[in-house]
Image (tube, coloured by chain):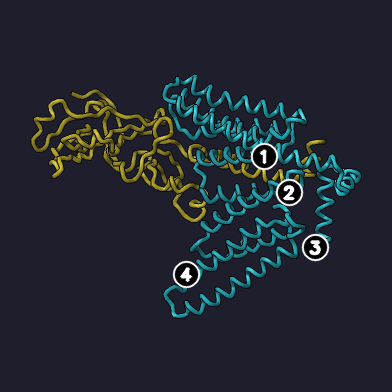
Chain colours: A cyan, B yellow
Amino acid sequence: MSDRDDALIEVVDLVRRHDLSLDEIAAALAGDASFAARRSSNMVARIFGYIGGTFVFAGLAIYVGMRWDDLGSIGRVLLTLGPGFSTFVLALVCTTDEGFERAATPLFLLAAVLQPAGILVMLQEYSTGGNPMYGVLLMNLVMAIQQACAFWARRRTVLALTTVVFASGFFVAGFDLLEVGNDLVGMVMGVSLGCIGWTLDRSRHKSLAGLLYLVGATSFLAAAYDTMRRTPIEPVFVGLACGVIFLSTVARSRSLLVVGTVALIGYIGDFINEHFSDSLAAPVLLMMFGFLLIGVGAAAVRVHNRYIKAQPGASA
Amino acid sequence: MAFKAFVRQNVVLVVGLTLPILVMVAFMLASGLPQRIADPPRYSLVFSSSDYSPAAQAFPVAPKFIVRDGALHAQFTRMPRQPGGYVNSGWKKLFLYDAASTKVRELPFGLPADVESIEVMREDPVDSARDLVLDTTLQSPDGYELTFGTRMNGGFFNEFLWRSRDTYGARLSRKDGGSVRLATADGQGTFSLSSVEFVGWVTGSGARR
C-alpha cells in the first residue's frame, strides 16, 4: 500500500466515525464560506474559552488560598466542592446549546480538578481517622461513576479521558490497599489501558488513543523489566519490547513505536553495562551498540513511514 | 441480547475493563485465605515497639522489658546525657495483640512517678500488664511465632504478587499457612522489623500483687 492508500483509509475512517456526508465534505473542499467562517470562529471561541477558564481557575485558587485559614469546615467544602459541582453542571448545560458547546471542554476539565479536591477536603474535614487511601479510593470511585455516566449521556472525548483517569485511580488505590505487588499492578494497568486505547482508537475518541498507548505500554514494560531484571527470564523482555513494536504497526501508533524502541535500546544498554562494563571488549561493543542504535533507529523510522504514517498530522 | 452483542463487538474493551476488576477480586479472596485455611492464633501476644516521638526520646531513662515468673517487669536504666545535652532514651511503647478480637491495642506505659530517684537501674512491674501471665517461649502453644517478611516464604511469584512494603512487616505466622499481620486497629499503622521486640505470649490471666 502507498501513502495515498493509507491516507484514503484514514479519510474513510474519519468520515464514518463522524457521520459526515459527501455533500458536507465537497462543500468544505470547495471553500464554502459558512465552513470557513465556522472554522475561524471555532478556533477563536476555543482559544478564548481555554484562556478564560484558566483565569477563572487561577482566580478561584488564589482566592481560596488567601481565605483558607479563616474558613471553617463547611466553608472549605463549599469553596472547593461547590464550584466544582457547579462547573460540572454548567458544562453539561453547555453541551445542550450549540452556541456554548466549545466552553464545555474547559469546564469539564475544571470540574474534574475541583470536584476531587472538594471530595478530599470534605473527607479531611469530617473523617475520624483511618487509612487516607480509603478516601482516595472513594473519591476516585465517585468521580469515575459521575464521569462515566456523563460520558454515556454526552459522548464527549474529554469525559472519556476523565473517566479513564479516575477509574485508573480507583484501581491503583484498591491495589495499594490490597498490597498487590507494584510490578503486577503496572502490568495489569498497562494491559488494561492498552485495551481501552485500542477500543478508543477505533471510535470518534481516537485522539485519546495515543496517550493511553503511551501510558499503558510504558507502565507494562517498566513493570515487566523490573520483574525480569537480573533473572533467568530477563531476555524475555526483548520479546516484549519487540512485541510492542509489532503492535505499533498493527495499531498504527507512534506512541507504541517510541515506547517499544526506547525499551529495546534501554535493555541493550543495560545488558552491555552489566556484562561488559569492565571488559576490554567494552569499547568495541559500544561501537557495535552505536551501529545497532543507528540500525534500530532507521528501522523504527522505516516502520513508521511504512505502516503508521497515514497522512500529515495523523494521531496516536 | 444487547449486552451479549456489546460484549461481542467490544471484546478488547471488555478485557481492558474486567482485567483489573478480576485481579482485585482475586486478591480480595486471597487476602482472606490464610485466615480461612488455618485456625487464627488462640494466644494473645505482648510486644514492644520503639517510640520515636521527640518527647519520648528525651526521657531520662530507657526501659527494657523482662518477664519474671510470668509477670511483666520494666527495667529502667538512667541514660547519660549526650555532649549537646541530648538524651536518647530509646523509649518503647507496649502493645497487646488480643487473640479474641484480633486487634492490636496499646498498653499504657509511661515514666515511673519518681523517675528522678533512679540513679542507675530499677525494676518495676508493669501495671497495665498486671493481669497477664506471660510465657517467653518464642513459639506459642498453638504453633504461632512472631515473624517478619512476606506472607508466604518469599520466592519469585510471591515477590511479584505482593508488594514489597509488606516484606518487613511483623506478622504472627504458622508453618501450615496461618498468618496474621500486626497492625493498629484502623489498619493504618504497621510494625516493622527494626522496631518490634517480642515480649511474651499471654498464657493466662489473674490479678497479681
Q: Position of residue A209 (x, y in %)?
A: 69, 48
Q: Which residue is mark 2?
A: A201
Could you tell whether A244 is left or right of B37 in the image? Answer: right
Q: Label 3 neighbourhood size at 10 Å, few (<14), some (14-19), many (20+)? A: some
* Front: mark 4 or 2: 2
Q: Identity of the amino acid at label 3?
A: Asp
Q: Identity of the amino acid at label 2?
A: Asp
Pinpoint the chain carrying mark 3.
A
Q: Which residue is mark 4?
A: A273
Q: Position of residue B103 (x, y in %)?
A: 40, 30
The residue sitting at 53% across, 24% down in the picture is A79
The span from disc 1 to disc 4 (Cα, nearest Å) is 49 Å
Q: Which residue is mark 1?
A: A47
Q: Secondary structure at mark 4?
A: helix
Could you tell whether B53 is left or right of A79 in the image? Answer: left
Pinpoint the chain carrying mark 4.
A
- Per the rendering, the mark at residue A163 is none
* Front: mark 2 or 1: 1
The span from disc 2 to disc 3 (Cα, nearest Å) is 20 Å
Q: Identity of the amino acid at label 4?
A: Asn
Could you tell whether A194 is left or right of B119 in the image? Answer: right
Pinpoint the chain carrying mark 1.
A
